[in-house]
Image (tube, grey):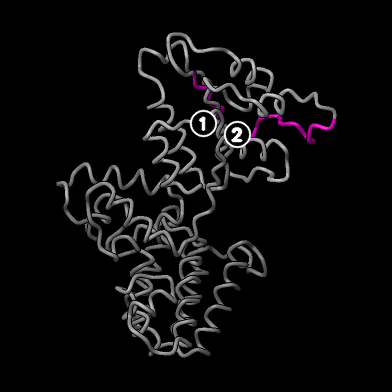
Amino acid sequence: MTISTLLSDLKSRKFKPVYLLHGEESYYIDLISGYIEGNLLKDEEKSFNQTTLYGRDTDITTVLNSAKRFPMMSDFQLIIVKEAQNLKWSKEDDRKGDDPLISYLEAPLSSTVLVFCYKHAKFDKRKRIYKLIEKNGVVFESATFYDNKVPQWIEGFVRDKAYRINPEASALIAEHLGNDLSKIAGEIEKLILNLEKGSEITRDHIYKNIGISKEYNVFELQNALARQNVVKANRIVNYFAANPKTNPIQMTLGVLSTWFTKLYKYHYIKGGEAKDIASELGVSPFFVKDFELAARAFTPEKVFNVVSLLREYDLKSKGVDATANTSHGELLRELVFKIMH
């Protein structure tokens, strides 16, 4: 089931007796469980009919005892099991017909809505538990969100809030915050508090509200490398070296590796319009001109060598084949020097 279909059903009050929300990305698990928690019951019904349990502190017997109760002065009761990945589930399928969880899932109580929030991992789809929830309830997998999809997700999230965001700003957020959708959503929610409805979020808003230096960030470092601006590149690297907590070398290397890998791919895309090239690279059409500029400075052979350097310095940053007492700042200076020469 897709997120849009699931949310549409919930808004139409089409509730199922059991939900398994699982996967490595926690944002949608929180979104769905939060919606059910906020909308299934009226405020006056919650004290008697809403129970929150935590996987580490409970067990299946407690969950089922709660689920088998009938609601008081309400059509439903809600049981939410948070951190369900820490719950002691049945280790094997029910071979003898005496597993209480499987027995319940075969005929779940229609007046109970039981929600399992199973975060940071996928539930084993081979288990009978999974198949029964899929049959008699809803299974939703919140899969890992890949980096190249994040800017597009940001644009959609902002649009749903009745705002706009330019491609440069969405890319800057993605590069700074990675693919942690919960963190991105939280930062955007705080940012739009100070903006008029319908206005556009720009790069300057990001610099001002999300704690990214306007001049010294990995996005500007990419631009400096593309333009072969040695002075600017060194100035940014020196800033990173002086502020390692806000500019960790692993994040910088990761962003540069992704960028140079896309640049290598750009060299082998045979023409086409900007939107087609952007689709091939997994970026906004806004950035195609930057790859065109960078391709003049970095031949395919040089890009290949840079990617190798990035892998080498990633290992060095983790202590592999690195000179003793070499700081991350020194490694980054050395790397940028080699990239630029």
Tell me if mark 1 has few (under 14), some (14-19) or many (20+) residues whose alpha carbon lies within 10 angstroms of its own. Answer: many
The amino acid marked with disc number 1 is: Lys
Is 294 placed left or right of 107 in the picture?
Answer: left
Residue ID at (49%, 82%): 264
Q: Secondary structure at mark 2?
A: helix
Toward which corner of the image does residue 314 lie, by quadrant?
bottom right
Look at the image and give the residue range highlighted in magenta.
77-95
Number of residues whose C-alpha sits closer than 10 Å to that of mark 2, classed few (under 14), some (14–19) or many (20 or more) = some
**Mark 1 residue element:** loop
Vertical position of residue 128 compared to residue 219: above or below: above
Residue at the disc numbered 1: 16
On screen, residue 249 versus residue 84, left or right, reads left
From the top left corner, tell me how far across and down residue 200 is, in percent. 19, 56
Looking at the image, tell me whether mark 1 or mark 2 is earlier in sequence order: 1
The foreground one among 319 and 34 is: 34
Reply above or below: 104 against 205: above
Q: Whole-percent x and y of residue 29?
A: 49, 40
Residue 53 higher or lower than 169, as above or below: above
Q: For the image shown, how many numbered marks are present on the structure?
A: 2
Contact (Cβ within 8 Å) of mark 1 with mark 2? yes
Say which of 333 and 67 sits in front: 67
Q: Which mark is residue 136?
A: 2
Q: Position of residue 97 (x, y in %)?
A: 81, 26
Asked if residue 129 is among those painted magenta in the image, a careful observer would answer: no
Which mark, by number, is residue 140?
Answer: none
Relative placement, left or right, of 103 versus 277 is right
